Image (cartoon, grey):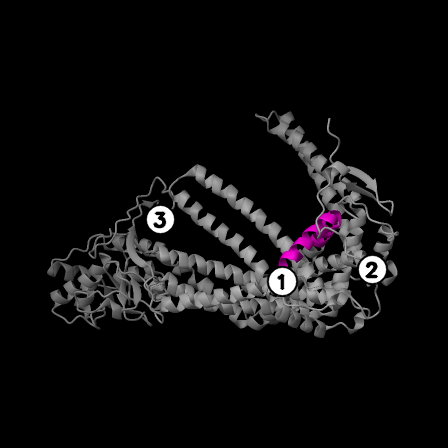
Amino acid sequence: MAGPIFAWRKNSSGVMELHLPDDEKVPDHPDNKQLAKRCSSDDYSPLDNGRRCTDVLFLLLIICSWVAMTGLGLASMGFIESEYIKQGDPNRLVNGLDYHGNLCGITNFVTPGGVDVINLPKAYPMPSGFFVCVESCPSTNNFDEFICEYEAQHDIDVTLGAAAGIGGSGVAESNNANKSIYLIYTGQKQCMPLIESTSFLGYCIPNLPLKDVLLSTANGTSNESEFSQENNYTTSSHHATITNGTAYINASISATSKSDLFDMAMADVHTVRYVIFIFGCGVAMTLGILFLLIIQVPGLLSLLVWSMIIAVDAGLVAAGYYTKGISATWETSGRPGNEALALYYGSYVLYGLAAVWCVMMLFLRKRVLLAIACVKEASRALSAMPLMTVFPVIQVLSLSLFTVVWGVCMAYLASSGEIEAKCMCPIFDQGFPRFVDDEVTPAPTLAMSSNRFDGNYTCGEGCYVYKELTYSTNTKYAGLYMIFVWFWTSQFIVAVGQLAVAVAVSKWYFSRNRRNVGNSTFMKSIFVVLVYHLGTAAFGALIIAMIKTIRAILSYIQKKATKSKLRLAVVLLKVLKCLVWCLEKCLKFINKQAYIQTAIFSYSFCKAARMGFFLILRNALRISGVSIVSQVVLFIGKVFITVASTISGYYYLQIHFGDQLNSLMAPTLLIAICSYAVSEMFDEVFGMAISTILQCFVAEEELFEPNQRFAPSSLSGTLDATQKKYNKKKSSSIGIDQ
């Protein structure tokens, strides 16, 4: 019978370690060796070995990708002639469709009144829920003038023997008799009075509830029935028709009845916009620095960490006790089924988890102490270089600038497809219309039509007109490439920030006189990354971008499979997406370790990744302890920054602007969102600093003798306690932790 795979042994310090037996050793790898001992002096550190440019090829590749992206954008804009990429126009994405399926301001379609739709860029709603193209959105309310469907306006002009108004757009001055006939067509949902509207993405959104406007317009006419009898028009069910028609409008455009509440909220935000910025950004950043200083108070960080660890264990025990009590109650009450039994066994599962957590924390207690020391030293490094906490803002601005350029190119590319106008028809359910597209399973009360337009009045009454773009294979590949470039660039910007933090923190760690370390050190670190290690950032970002692109492709395939109702394929794709997501998380973790290795030793990405991987292997328990503690501290910091910023901002608004605002809800919510975003950026920098401190600690442990190390006081005590004999040769077995 085979022997055990693992064995426990004592190291030179008397600490138990988990080793592989001789017959199960992993083959030696040149990178899986502890660093060679070096002699240290007061003016020497591992960073003094000289920097060199790393992974230049990948820097050139990402530059070429940006050039190719620019070429695609210029081709889709029409500046470069291409037989593969058609010229686009972003207006095709936002401009509305009329009831004939014409794209307002784009399609060449001449109305019966002689006006070309290409000169009418705005879409104005009718009571039917359709839209007609107009030259501009009405700027005032005028219930004596109307906008009508093209054929209806032509019939009215012929009937009244009048001109077609402003260029056949449907606007015409009316006397009382004329207004009556317009009201009749309004009742037939073919005309609409002029209502002050806001232009939004090519549509005219009325600023008043349409139902109330139409009913008021109808009620304000005294001679409508008389005029109808003289001219043989039918006005029966006029009010009911208007009421029915407006329901379609309310379903196809934004709910204008809620515009007042939105306007008040936006007015409040505009009034206190500077306060929102100050508390959401400035105060939040200040609180981040304050948090770094607070956790440096002797004993406070240890108290917080161990309190959270004990709280987790107590929570599991309490949950198990409560679950067992509920189980007994249900069993006594005779609750049917096996729910009481399931809860009974579930309580013991919770007890078991509490026991596992307790044993694990006892086993990792020394690593937790090391992790607490790493967190404390990372906070000191950030306190010495506070500019580091602001650097994510520069990253966000850089990504925003790139996204603007990328978005313009993507808009032209996306608008180069062929537009197909379709209609979707609802059935009213308890007075409310429901719409379903072709990717959603219709409810039993719905009927849907997806008939294509043939240029005539083919979409049924009350149907919703929408546009669908179809793309050539070349355009689809170009779009996929654009998505890949955005992933690559965004991850590249993140990687540059991680490298800059790692270089700065490692400079702080390997410094004999840390009082000389400040913001200038961080600026020099940025310079080092920009000059030497942009290629490494591009290499690591490329790997993550490829994984993200694969996830995007799987999501697209899953969407198609869902549409085709291939349930087994959908389940398999979800599982595959989950596995790819896990792979992405693992690669991000390895990338972070590789960036730190590059920051310390100036390795290229591949070697840094290998060295980082084996470092994780040799120090798995240490890294586990640091991971647990850092997550606890980062969570506390995130809550502290967000809650403190939001509460202080709320009370400031209440005291100084309470009488000027309609409500404090919208400004306070924005302060909370902004402060949370700042806390996320703060956590990213702090987490990278903690990981860098740990790797510097491990590198120093292997490089230097105890009396020659750079470790701060809190870490040097840990070193002395865990490793006392450095002159003995390490075991040839691979230890899980040392």
Residue type highlighted by circle 1: Met
Task: Determine the CA span between mark 2 and mark 1.
Answer: 34 Å
Residue under label 3 = 437
Give the crowd class for mark 1: few <14, some 14-19, many >=20 residues within 10 Å: many
User: Is 476 colored magenta in this rendering?
Assistant: no
Q: Amino acid at mark 2?
A: Phe
Q: Secondary structure at mark 2?
A: loop
Region of the chain picked out in magenta, as a range: 604-632
**1 or 3: tag closer to the N-terminus:** 3
Q: Upstream in the sequence, badge 2 or badge 3?
A: 3
Give the structural element (helix, strand or loop) at label 1: helix
Residue 634 lies in what quarter of the image? bottom right
Residue 9 image point, x, y percent: 82, 40
Instruction: Report whether 735 appears left or right of 550.
Output: right
What amino acid is found at the position of numbered circle 3 in the picture? Answer: Asp
The residue that mark 1 highlights is 681
Chief secondary structure of the magenta portion: helix
| Foreground disc of the pair 1, 3 | 1
